[in-house]
Image (cartoon, grey):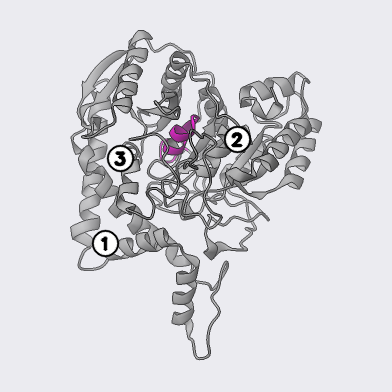
Amino acid sequence: MNANELTIAEARDALAGGELSAVDLTMACLTAIDAGTPLNAFVHATPEIALDQARAADARRGADAGALNGIPLGIKDLFCTKGVASQAASNILKGFKPEYESTVTSKLFEAGAVMLGKLNMDEFAMGSSNETSCYGDAVNPWKVDDRRLTPGGSSGGSAAAVAADLCLGATGTDTGGSIRQPAAFTGIVGIKPTYGRVSRWGIVAFASSLDQAGPMTKSVRDAAILLGAMAGHDPKDSTSADIPVPDFEAALTGDIRGRKIGIPREYRMEGMPAEIEALWARGREMLADAGAEIVDISLPHTKYALPAYYVIAPAEASSNLARYDGVRYGHRARLGQGDGIVDMYEKTRAEGFGKEVQRRVMIGTYVLSAGFYDAYYNRARKVRALIKRDFDEAFAAGVDAILTPATPSSAFGLGEMAEADPVAMYLNDVFTVTVNLAGLPGISVPVGLDAKGLPLGLQLIGRPWDEAGLLNHAHVLERAAGFVEKPRKWW
């Protein structure tokens, strides 16, 4: 096994025991990144920074070393990294190199992590297939025919990099499923924490009341380790919760006897593929075999989640993206003689934003306009409150976690859906958006392969602030499923 194929937990133990140096581990990842160019996962490689951080980690080795000392990670291009291009995969931020570090990356570096580079993503995190990126499509390392498959979105580069062993773990962000859906498509683990658990400071905003950063890893244990380093109160983020961070790894006891797992009847969607239904049934059996009690629950407002999400998220996006005007940073359009400041705004935004971002900004501006604010935005906010109440009632009735499919299908081919029907693409979020609307933690765990040989995942949804319990349930599911398949190397 090459060093880059290790999990974070395995590498941590090898580094601590002196069997491996951080420099050797980092070099193995950098070599894999060079070989992995066809995946288009890393879009800004930072080998000099990585090797400097690895040497520092080797010098630091010992009792005082951080929880991630010497662990090489990939960072989604949405996280601002000081002096390193941070474009959110958009041409409008071309050339932008922040003078500051996001809270999440600061915390990771304090824990001793090594940054290999920045990862591909959908532009401003708007997409479910990584096809809206100014860097071009990220490609799923899983391949079963002559097609190039999507790694999912928006954290597609993160998912592809982890699945292909280009890095040991990666950061992602999740606004409507952007960690969990790509994790399911690539056979890895991805957790979206409770809203407010991880600081949003220094992360380029999409929809501020929905965005949440989280880890994407090769195992549930790795997710627990990485989340522990990322989480915590941040006074710079007004939505960050001042709640102690438990030891997530210590919570992985593997014991869920007597726990109640809810199965929401509304998630049995019309036309759901038989393979997804069978996988869900298998997940229920695995948790029951581990001693959990499986109970049917109702989340009656689920059917309104997608329309509510696609009003709220674009509304917040149109507000957040108003700052990109060509004045202070990033791209500025060339102006003709006689052009004024309004012309500059219009030309800059037309050139800098891609089609999907333009579409969502226009939708958002429309639903926030004077004549439609109450009809769309306010109504969507009320629906959101009802969706949250559904979950609150389920948890109040004693449910500890909720099991659902993660995606309505396995990975599809690049170019098969994006241009044809953007609304069909939005349906990829059908099982995940409720979790963001309710601010809950959710995790995707790889459980099996479909008939074509592509990975499928199941989603577990937890109580607010109970990532520890959620990770333990996921750990049990992971162990019972025994998913060890990896993509065959074709790149």
* Residue 151 drawn above or below residue 24: below
- CA distance separating discs 1 and 3: 21 Å
Q: Is residue 186 left or right of residue 265?
A: right
Is residue 212 rendered magenta in the image?
no
x then y, percent, for residue 123: 48, 55
Residue placed under numbered mark 3 in the picture: 430
- Disc 2 and disc 1 in contact, CB within 8 angstroms: no
Q: Is residue 414 left or right of residue 333?
A: left
What kind of element bears circle 1? helix
Query: Residue sitting at 39 percent across and 40 percent down?
Result: 177
Please tell me how crowded label 2 is: few (under 14), some (14-19), or many (20+) other residues with Cα within 10 Å: few
* Residue 367: mark in rendering: 1
Along the line of sight, the residue nearer the viewer: 44 or 372: 44
Q: Specify the segment rendered in magenta.
A: 181-197
Query: Residue sitting at 57 percent across and 29 percent down?
Result: 488
Quadrant where the C terminus is found in the figure: top right
Which of marks 3 and 1 precedes in the sequence?
1
Q: How many marks?
A: 3
Q: Is residue 248 visible?
A: no
Query: Which mark is in front, 2 or 1?
Result: 2
* Residue 490: mark in rendering: 2
Which of marks 1 and 2 precedes in the sequence?
1
What amino acid type should be assigned to the residue bearing mark 2? Trp
Query: Which mark is in front, 3 or 2?
Result: 2
Along the line of sight, the residue nearer the viewer: 44 or 329: 44
Please tell me how crowded label 1 is: few (under 14), some (14-19), or many (20+) other residues with Cα within 10 Å: many
